[in-house]
Amino acid sequence: MPLTAEQEKRKLPPKHRKDEKRAEENERFEKLLNKLEEMTTNGRLKDMAYHFTNKKEVIKVNLLAGISRGVGLTIGTALFIALLVFLLSQMISLPVIGESIANLLEIVEQYRE
């Protein structure tokens, strides 16, 4: 349905309409962002209050975190050492470096026994 002459005359130029629309979108976005920030802050405060007032929960969380760190460190160290030994065993065929690495591997083997 086409606009009447009166409506065409009152219509804002396209540039101003886009700015107006953009301003409305920005306001809506800011309101949404403020609401989201308020929700996360309130949720975090409730969570912190629960964890710091319940001693059993604090102990449980810290124990689980400590066990996880210990297991992760152990597995990571074992993988790193295994990779290092594998790379060193591949370098034994090099003439100059090979002798030093072979001596190092012999020391490691003696230590294992």
Image: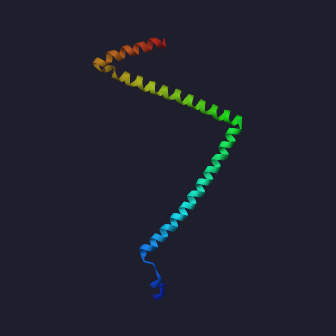
The residue sitting at the bottom extreme is 5
Please say if 107 is above or below 82: above
The front one of 80 and 106 is 80
The residue sitting at the left extreme is 95
Which residue is found at the position 58% from the left and 53% from the top? 37
Count of all numbered marks drawn on residues in the image: 0
Whether residue 4 is visible to the viewer of this picture, yes or no, is: no
Please say if 60 is above or below 104: below
Q: Where is residue 12 in the image (x, y as percent from the top left)?
A: 45, 78
Q: Position of residue 27 (x, y in %)?
A: 53, 64
Please say if 74 is above or below 46: above
Which residue is found at the position 65% from the left and 42% from the top? 48
Describe the colour scheme in one phrase.
Answer: rainbow
Whether residue 66 is visible to the viewer of this picture, yes or no, is: yes
Q: Quadrant of residue 47?
A: top right
Q: Where is residue 68 in the image (x, y as percent from the top left)?
A: 58, 32
Q: Quadrant of residue 95?
A: top left
Which residue is found at the position 28% from the left and 17% from the top? 96
Which residue is found at the position 43% from the left and 15% from the top? 108
The front one of 67 and 54 is 54
Q: In this view, does 12 lie to the left or right of 40?
A: left
Q: In this view, does 58 lie to the left or right of 5?
A: right
Q: Where is residue 18 in the image (x, y as percent from the top left)?
A: 45, 71
